[in-house]
Amino acid sequence: MVAAWLDMVDPTREEVLAALPVHVDPDVVEALAAPSRDRDPRPLLVGHGSYVFGVLVAMLPLADEHEILHQEIFVVATPQRLVTVRKTPPRGPAYDTSVLEAAATDATVGVLIHRLVDDVADTYLDLLDAIFAEIDALEDRIDELRPSVVRLRLSELRHELLHRRRTVSATRGALRRVLDGRVDVGDHALFPAEVERLFGDTYDTLVRVTEELDVARDLLSGVRDHLQSKIAENQNEVGKKLTVIASLVLVPSLIVGFYGQNFSGEFGQGFWTLGVSTALILASTAVQLALFRWRRWI
């Protein structure tokens, strides 16, 4: 059966009530009419007897910014009709439903929902590319940036990966419910066997995204270890330089201290002259520098 599809963007409560194909729970109406909030929404697909209610979240990285754009899409579906409600996020446009427009003329409601879910899953793949590119760029510039800047960005990326994985896992859990037959209307009227097989392919994509997010977390840990080793190396270099400076000052200080002793009747000797002490200081410094250079300490 070809679906009747109605799409709305930021509707009012009255518009939602007029567009819904069946009577729905008040909580669902409030969710459909509420404005988009700057938060991490939780994806879901649940059956409510005569209809299926769903929340999908597309995630798009903003160009030249370290932020992710959340695009919420709400779904109310019966075997005959599909209603989608798109929320405009605080920054950026609402979700583009062109993938549904291309198939709305000859597809069933179940197929349309799959098209929508599959397109949302594709945005997660784009997000993965952006995350890996960010990690690579951070690792390449770790020697140029200040450690405090790198630590801050590592912390931000770690929190982003945590939130992104939570969203992907919730979407995967919603698809698992469809594959298990726990989300449907009637006797598989909305998601027949052939449509469930389509969801299986998308489910595999989400499993791969979850695994890649775990890989990204491991790469992030590698960058953090690189930063810590770089800081330790810099500290060792500073300590080595300070040790060299202290060593160079130690012998001249000994010579000057020795010459400063008060030996009555001995200062008339030739080896107590200023020239001799200066020569000893210069010679000992030169010997130390040569030794440090030979041992590659400087």
Image (cartoon, grey):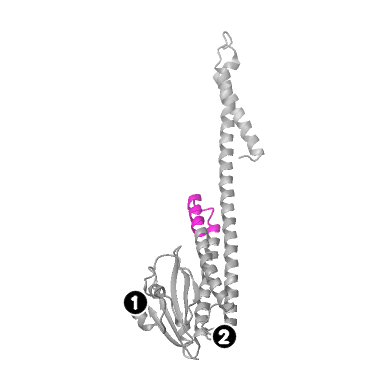
Depth check: 186 or 223 in front? 186
Q: Circle 1 — which element?
A: helix
Q: For residue 243: magenta?
A: no
Height in image: 179 above or below 62? below
Name the side, left or right, on which 58 lies relative to 210.
left
Q: Quadrant of residue 247?
A: top right
Residue 163 vertical position relative to residue 32 in the rendered view, above or below: above
Circle 1/circle 2 CB separation < 8 Å:
no
In this rendering, the answer to whether 87 lies above or below 78 is above
- Of 136 and 53, the residue lying toward us: 53
Q: Residues within 10 Å of mark 1 (few under 14, many from 20)?
A: some
Work out whether residue 63 can be spotted.
no
Of helix, strand and loop, which one carries label 2?
loop
Q: Amino acid at mark 2?
A: Pro
| Quadrant in which residue 271 is drawn | top right
Q: Is residue 139 left or right of residue 85?
A: right
Q: Which residue is mark 2?
A: 192
Tell me the quarter of the picture where residue 177 sits: bottom right
Q: Percent position (x, y) of residue 149?
A: 48, 53
Q: Residue 104: x, y in percent? A: 47, 87
Q: Nearer the viewer, residue 66 or 234?
A: 66
Q: Position of residue 163 (x, y in %)?
A: 50, 63
Residue range in magenta is 138-157
Quick one: label 1 or label 2, which is nearer the N terminus? 1
Q: Which residue is mark 1?
A: 13
- What amino acid type should be assigned to the residue bearing mark 1? Arg
